[in-house]
Image (spheres, rainbow, N blue to C red):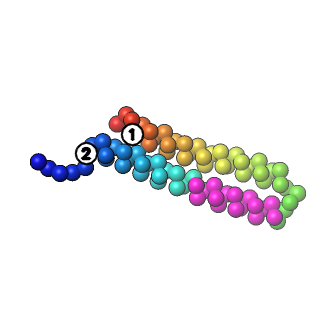
Amino acid sequence: MTEGISPDAMKVLGAGLAAGLGMIGPGIGIGILGAAAMSAIGRNPEARGAILTNMILAIAFAEAIGIYALIVAVILALVV
């Protein structure tokens, strides 16, 4: 009898890796975006409205990538 990792364990491991690695990029991107926006507001406070609008839009796009990673992880865990 061979010992090893069960297929169910591999499925959960793959889902966890997909979610974890898929969320690292958007997390770093949102952090960099927030820092750059605060720096830009500090340099030019009059442009606060335009900077915040563009920042929120870019954060939404970055967060969508994280949501796609979460969907892939759920599919890996439940369907595959």
Residue 66 in the figure: left or right of residue 2: right
Q: Residue at x 52, y 51 (%)?
A: 23
Q: Residue at x 78, y 53 (%)?
A: 51
Instruction: Locate residue 50, reporting x and y percent.
Output: 81, 50
**Farthest residue, direction left:** 1
Residue 13 in the figure: left or right of residue 50: left
Which mark identifies residue 77?
A: 1
Q: Which of disc 1 and disc 2 is earlier in sequence? A: 2
**Residues drawn in magenta:** 27-42
Q: Is residue 7 magenta?
A: no
Q: In front: 11, or 3? A: 3
Sort mark 1 into few (<14), some (14-19) or many (20+) by Cα contacts within 10 Å: some
Q: Disc 2 designates what residue?
A: 6
Q: Residue at x 81, y 64 (%)?
A: 42
Q: Find numbered disc 1 in the image and state the secondary structure of the residue it sits on.
A: helix
Instruction: Locate residue 43, reporting x and y percent.
Output: 82, 65
Q: In front: 1, or 26? A: 1
How many numbered discs, if any? 2
The kind of residue tagged 2 is: Ser
Q: CA distance from mark 2 to mark 1?
A: 14 Å
Q: Is residue 34 magenta?
A: yes
Residue 37: image quadrant is: bottom right
**Farthest residue, direction right:** 46
The kind of residue tagged 1 is: Ala
Q: Residue at x 70, y 62 (%)?
A: 35
Instruction: Locate residue 25, reporting x and y percent.
Output: 54, 55
